Image (cartoon, rainbow, N blue to C red):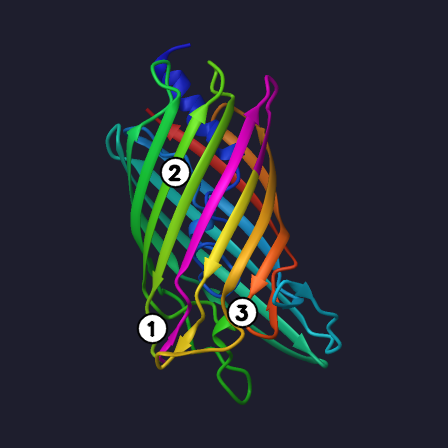
């Protein structure tokens, strides 16, 4: 197999792994953006396109590390469409952009609050000093970027402005840092292990609300079979600081999450793939007395790689 074909196969096979940070950078309290960005970096003059649908059930009530029966009948869910476009500028440099559309819904005692619209965007510049090929079993990529508040962050019901976690957009800029390392375990690079880390530094919105800065670390592996099917498994740890308003910490926000993310992918062609993954909580240690958090999240992605 030629060097170019191996690099192309590795770029597409990398989509079989779970994303490097499933919940590291939020366009709200529950819809990730950076988490949908795939680990593959296109080669020079290549384009990568992806469309992702996400669903989050955020109805689980947790006190510290214990799940608490909820007597309020509260239901909370979020959905999003995320569009990614990446372009290989050179053999080592690439640029990625994400756009999102978001809908949040919360039901309490028969009352429903809902907000939808354009969410936040992400732009990121990636540098890949090493990539998997016939000459190397290692891949290394660094990224730096920004989250841009494109959508509405002051949606309201009939009486008051909705809480920040129900807004389509955070209304605030953020700085992003990301790193990814992978190692091929066989000559075809069909079996890989990887580790990734990301950090988000959040700014304040116009109401002086700041989502807590967050750090995510993921450890995972992927296997591309001789058939069109590929499989991945990821262990994801996330730490988030407490949110703040007017520089004062808000109780019952922030904490630590540990999730497992299995994924399966089908390659319709060498460059067109469909991937499904689900995030399942393993352990949580959340700040203060009570927090509603993710019961589970699911994702479906259609991706396409083309160009030279």
| Spatial CA span between label 2 and label 1 | 28 Å
Q: In the rendered structure, which disc, 3 or 1, sits on the residue that comes first in sequence?
A: 1
Label 2's element? strand
Q: Which residue is mark 1?
A: 204
In this rendering, the answer to whether 101 lies above or below 73 is above
N-terminal-most mark, 2 or 1: 2
| Residue nearer the viewer, 93 or 211 | 211
Q: Looking at the rendered structure, which numbered label has been put on residue 180?
A: 2
For the point 51% across and 64% down, which residue is it?
A: 255
| Residue shown at the point (46%, 43%) measured from the top left | 20
**For the residues carrying marks 2 and 1, which lies nearer the camera in this image?**
2
Q: Is residue 242 left or right of residue 45?
A: right
How far from the left and from the top, in percent, is residue 67?
A: 69, 65
**Residue 265 lies in the magenta-colored region:** no
- Mark drawn on residue 228: none
Highlighted range, magenta: 208-233
């Amino acid at each position: 197999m030629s060097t170019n074909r191996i690099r192309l196969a590795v770029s597409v096979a990398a989509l079989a792994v779970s994303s490097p940070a499933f919940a590291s950078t939020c366009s709200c309290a529950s819809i990730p953006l950076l988490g949908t960005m795939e680990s593959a970096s296109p080669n020079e003059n290549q384009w990568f396109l992806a469309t992702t649908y996400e669903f989050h059930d955020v109805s689980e009530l947790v006190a510290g590390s214990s799940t608490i029966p909820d007597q309020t009948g509260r239901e909370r869910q979020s959905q999003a469409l995320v569009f990614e476009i990446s372009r290989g500028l050179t053999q080592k440099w690439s640029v990625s952009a994400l756009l999102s559309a978001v809908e949040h819904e919360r039901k309490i005692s028969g009352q429903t609050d809902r907000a939808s619209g354009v969410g936040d965007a992400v732009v990121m510049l990636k540098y890949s000093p090493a990539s998997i090929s016939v000459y190397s079993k290692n891949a290394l990529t660094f990224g730096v970027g920004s989250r841009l508040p494109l959508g509405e962050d002051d949606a309201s019901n009939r009486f008051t402005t909705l809480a920040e976690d129900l807004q389509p957009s955070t209304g605030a800029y953020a700085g992003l840092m990301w790193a990814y390392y992978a190692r091929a375990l066989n000559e075809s690079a069909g079996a890989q292990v990887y580790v990734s880390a990301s950090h988000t530094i959040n700014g304040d919105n116009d109401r002086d609300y700041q989502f807590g800065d967050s750090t995510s670390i993921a450890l995972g592996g992927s296997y591309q079979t001789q058939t069109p099917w590929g499989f991945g498994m990821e262990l994801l740890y996330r730490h988030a600081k407490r949110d703040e308003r007017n520089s004062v910490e808000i109780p019952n926000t922030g904490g630590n999450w540990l999730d497992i993310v299995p994924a399966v992918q089908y390659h319709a062609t060498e460059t067109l793939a469909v991937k499904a993954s689900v995030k399942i909580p393993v352990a949580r240690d959340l700040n203060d007395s009570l927090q509603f958090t993710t019961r589970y999240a699911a994702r479906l992605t259609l991706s396409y790689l083309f160009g030279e």
